[in-house]
Amino acid sequence: CSCAFATIATLEGLWQIRTGELKSLSVQYLVDCDLGSNGCKGGTFDSAFKFATTTHNGAIPSEYDYPFKRIQQTCNNDIIGAAGFDGYRFLYPGDEQQLLLAVAQQPVAVSIASGHYEFYHFRGDGIYSGPCGSNVSHGVAIVGYGESADGQKYWIIKNSWGVKWGDLGYMKLARGTGH
């Protein structure tokens, strides 16, 4: 489900930037209805964003109207969209400067390696610079970036693992390290 979570987190952030209104959009809608994303058994950002921006004129229902169930179910296409989107674009992998420029404008969905024990069990608000794993297979949203008082640069990522992970579901991930 991480691909669906990261896609929706990115679109929620973009909606808030464009309209000033914070909306909770339905992850379950992508899990159930975007057959190309394979429910919670994997998925691609290409499929998720294509579905989110073209199906029902790019209208995505709210979390309230189409709540998360943690399992793929039959798609309910009768729900009215709460927010609409009309396009997306991809960045070149590995171009950190291009990513920095994009994140300065809006949240960006990315795939990362997340299988390492230390990463998976990270808690707190410090900057994580430890191992992440070797298999790039987990979707997160980069929602910002910053620099600590001692000059350490980091990305702010929003994860789908709940509020007990990281700092209420967010992490400062060291930037410029190839993570």
Image (tube, helix red, strand yellow):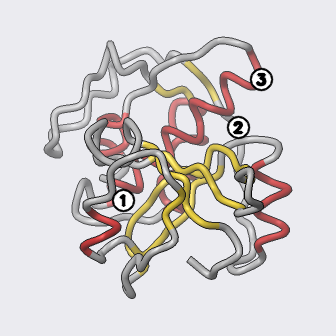
Type of amino acid at the residue the image marks with label 2: Asp
Task: Say left or right for 43 vs 154.
Answer: left
Residue picked out by circle 1: 37
* Disc number for residue 18: 3
* Residue in the image at 41% along x and 41% along y: 167
Q: Distance between the residues labelled 2 and 3?
A: 13 Å
Circle 1/circle 2 CB separation < 8 Å? no
Q: N-terminal of the two: label 1 or label 2?
A: 1
Residue neighbourhood size for the residue with mark 1, other residues' Cα within 10 Å, grouped as few (<14), some (14–19), many (≥20): many
The C terminus appears in which quarter of the rendering?
Answer: bottom right
Viewer-proximal residue, 92 or 73? 92
Q: What element carries label 2?
A: loop
Nearer to us of marks 1 and 3 is 3
Decide: is 46 above or below 157.
below
Residue 139 % position (x, y):
44, 60
The quadrant where residue 114 appears: bottom left
Type of amino acid at the residue the image marks with label 3: Arg
Q: N-terminal of the two: label 2 or label 3?
A: 3
Residue picked out by circle 2: 86
